[in-house]
Amino acid sequence: MARTRRFTVSLAVLVALAATTAVASASGSVKGQSGPLSVTFVPSTHTPKINAKWPLSVTATVNGKPAQHATAVYQFLFGGLIVSTQYPRFNKHFTFTGHFSDNLIFPPDSKGEPLTLRVVIKASGHTVNLNWSITAHS
């Protein structure tokens, strides 16, 4: 009986992890879900140009309706470690309802560095992390 119980717990953990995992689609977007929160992140490319606007958009729904009072944060990872945290539109307390668009500008110091942009969306007590690999160029 203990063996079955351990398997059930392991299966429950795997299901919970799968619910918060982001999945890249062929269309160049990343989708993720945690409970009723579903998020789609649409970046423009994996290779942003230095000192040029790099557009992105995010859509968040809760139970199929636009997420109310959702928050967003950008985390930049290098080698799996967070090296910078930024906020959409330079607003530390950025909130949105359902959708937002933004433009990032990569500085010359980021040229050629393999980074991961993680967009962290929180709404209705749930969190979704969406990762996108990037390498800026001139």
Image (cartoon, rainbow, N blue to C red):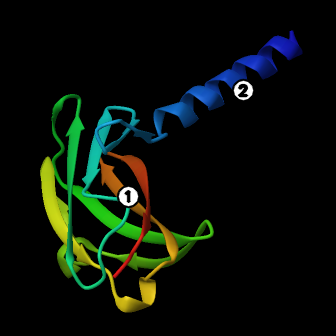
Element type at mark 2: helix
User: Farthest residue toward the top?
Assistant: 1
Q: CA distance from mark 1 to mark 2?
A: 26 Å
The part of the image, by quadrant, that contains residue 131 is bottom left
Residue kind at label 1, given as amino acid type:
Val
The part of the image, by quadrant, that contains residue 103 is bottom left
| Location of residue 108 in the rendering, given as x and y in whole percent from the top left corner | 37, 90
The part of the image, by quadrant, that contains residue 31 is top left
From this view, report whether residue 49 is shown above or below residue 28. Answer: below
Question: Residue 120 got which mark?
Answer: 1
From this view, report whether residue 34 is shown above or below residue 108. Answer: above
Q: Residue at x 41, y 76 (%)?
A: 85
Residue kind at label 2, given as amino acid type:
Ser
Q: Residue at x 45, y 79 (%)?
A: 84
Q: Residue at x 36, y 66 (%)?
A: 47
From this view, report whether residue 87 is shown above or below residue 28. Answer: below
Q: Which residue is mark 2?
A: 10
Left or right for 65, reference 50: left
Q: Residue at x 47, y 32 (%)?
A: 19
| Location of residue 1 in the rendering, given as x and y in whole percent from the top left corner | 86, 9
| Location of residue 10 in the rendering, given as x and y in whole percent from the top left corner | 72, 26
Element type at mark 1: strand
Q: Nearer the viewer, mark 1 or mark 2?
A: 1
Left or right for 112, reference 43: right
- Label 1 vs 2, first from the N-terminus: 2
Q: Residues within 10 Å of mark 1 (few under 14, many from 20)?
A: some
